[in-house]
């Protein structure tokens, strides 16, 4: 769907560099996100060494061998890219971006490329190309919508991820992601928001008191319940920012009577490794496994968060036990199943406003969670409307791929990345937009604010909390 034309003032603001010239000169990196200081010497050689190590110890070579042999220049993917639609810049065509990394692979990691380079005197990867990749790979939201349009099946989201992975190995990674991950893996709190356990417990106690006042019934948040059916892991930021979502989830469990628990040993579903590093991805999942084993739970239950759900669903078995790994499910799957089994009653007279639904890319694009939230919403929201396009062909919120956590690029995210999404929501006339993902909620709230729109962004369980009938 066409977005409103980008004005020159908006373009200038979106692409302005927030960093001081001295920092750019010291790091030799003119990107819009902040980066911790790193070794800038001989970057091409170090990039190639990191690339070689990743190829040696992973399975990326299989995909790259295929992608490097076929054309990645037809540009059909452009029609599915909301970034390109907003800017009209050829450099924002997904296959143009992928070709940057594939050209490095052909030149340095294939026999024909190495021979051609020697014969023609091609020096290969340059410092300028490394800087160009550092810039463009974080323009992409890694929503993977372009994958549907590529006639050769190139997964540009995968190439973007790999490019970021290699860059991170030489020190080029957004500071916002690096700092959060360091706290999660090495810090005293052990989570990305640096929430200490006493603060977590205070927050849960406060929410239970709120529900007691509102629903006149005791609704607890179980903590460290050994042998529970479900270990619950939301995006940790939900504990301080998404009270209504958490109360809705607790109320659902109060209605079903199933056993669940939050672990004080580890309670963060966020996994930024999905955005830039397979090593981080693995280490975070091993923390989940350690907590699950400590509490002897039977299943991993992820809260309303797209990337947390996808990283656990698809990679927990890979890194944490294979066929013996614990099952992973998303809270929307749990609630939907309980409703289908007749264990939840939803009052259709409570939410009368117009409601629409935003599909988080990480759970909708593969077709995993598409109809479940819609069936729930239609069960109690009389004025429900769809965005177009939707479901697997949904348009990203504009903050995907971890970019929503990079506050210094907010002007880019809300003027460029989320531009088409804003038009899509505006067209529905909805008063509530349900976005069951921590990252989507943050991006869409900033988008509504910056675009001057009056639509409230909520989670699925925010509305379920309003409509749920408790005995």
Image (cartoon, rainbow, N blue to C red):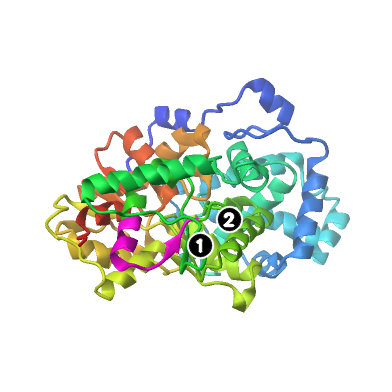
Question: Which residue is labeled 1 in the image?
Answer: 310
Q: Residue furthest bottom?
A: 323
Viewer-side residue, 94 vs 204: 204
Question: Whole-Å distance between the Cαs marked 2 and 1?
Answer: 9 Å
For the question of whether residue 87 can be seen, the reply is no
Q: Quadrant of the C terminus?
A: bottom left
Residue 266: percent from the left, percent from the top? 56, 53
Residue 433: percent from the left, percent from the top? 28, 49
Position of 172 compared to 292: left or right?
A: right
**Label 2 close to label 1 by CB (< 8 Å):** yes
Viewer-side residue, 29 vs 297: 297
Q: Is residue 172 magenta?
A: no
Question: Which residue is labeled 2 in the image?
Answer: 274
At mark 2, the secondary structure is: helix
Count neighbours of disc 2 (C-alpha within 10 A) and say few if under 14, some if 14 to 19, many if 20 or more. Answer: many
In the figure, 316 relative to 196: above or below?
Answer: below
The quarter holding residue 380 reads bottom left
In the figure, 376 relative to 5: above or below?
Answer: below
Q: Which mark is residue 228?
A: none
The quarter holding residue 453 reads top left
Q: Which residues are magenta?
A: 249-262
Dot placed on the residue nearer the N-terminal end, 2 or 1: 2
At mark 1, the secondary structure is: helix
């Amino acid at each position: 769907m066409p977005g409103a034309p980008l004005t020159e003032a908006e373009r200038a603001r979106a692409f302005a560099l927030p960093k001081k010239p001295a920092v750019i000169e010291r790091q030799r990196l003119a990107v819009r996100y902040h980066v911790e200081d790193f070794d800038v010497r001989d970057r091409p050689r170090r990039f190639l060494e990191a690339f070689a190590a990743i190829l040696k110890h992973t399975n990326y070579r299989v995909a790259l061998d295929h992608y490097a042999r076929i054309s990645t220049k037809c540009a059909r993917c452009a029609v599915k890219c909301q970034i390109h639609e907003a800017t009209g810049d050829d450099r924002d065509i997904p296959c143009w971006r992928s070709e940057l990394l594939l050209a490095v692979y052909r030149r340095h990691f294939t026999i024909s490329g190495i021979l051609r380079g020697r014969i023609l005197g091609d020096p290969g990867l340059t410092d300028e190309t490394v800087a160009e990749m550092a810039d463009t790979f974080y323009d992409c939201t890694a929503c993977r919508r372009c994958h549907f349009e590529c006639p050769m099946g190139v997964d540009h989201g995968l190439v973007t991820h790999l490019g970021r992975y290699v860059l991170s190995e030489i020190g080029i990674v957004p500071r916002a992601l690096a700092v959060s991950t360091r706290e999660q893996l090495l810090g005293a709190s052990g989570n990305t928001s640096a929430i200490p356990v006493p603060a977590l417990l205070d927050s849960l106690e406060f929410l239970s008191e709120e529900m007691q006042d509102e629903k006149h019934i005791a609704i607890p948040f179980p903590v460290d319940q050994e042998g529970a059916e479900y270990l619950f892991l939301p995006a940790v930021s939900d504990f301080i920012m998404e009270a209504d979502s958490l109360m809705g989830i607790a109320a659902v469990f109060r209605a079903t009577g199933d056993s669940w628990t939050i672990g004080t040993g580890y309670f963060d579903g966020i996994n930024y490794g999905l955005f830039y590093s397979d090593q981080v991805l693995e280490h975070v999942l091993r923390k989940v496994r350690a907590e699950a084993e400590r509490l002897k739970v039977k299943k991993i239950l992820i809260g309303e968060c797209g990337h947390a759900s996808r990283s656990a669903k698809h990679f927990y078995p890979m890194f944490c036990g294979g066929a013996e790994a614990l099952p992973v499910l998303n809270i929307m799957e749990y609630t939907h199943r309980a409703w289908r089994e007749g264990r939840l009653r939803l009052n259709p007279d409570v939410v009368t406003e117009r409601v629409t639904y935003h599909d988080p890319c990480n759970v909708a694009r593969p077709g995993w969670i598409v109809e479940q939230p819609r069936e729930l919403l239609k069960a109690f929201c009389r004025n429900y409307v769809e965005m177009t396009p939707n479901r697997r062909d949904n348009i990203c919120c504009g903050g995907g791929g971890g970019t929503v956590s990079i506050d210094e690029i907010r002007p880019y995210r809300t003027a460029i990345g989320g531009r088409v999404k804003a038009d899509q929501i505006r067209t529905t006339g909805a008063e509530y937009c349900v976005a069951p993902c921590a990252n989507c909620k943050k991006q869409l709230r900033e988008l509504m604010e910056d675009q001057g729109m009056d639509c409230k962004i909520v989670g699925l369980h925010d509305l379920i909390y309003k409509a749920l009938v408790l005995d």
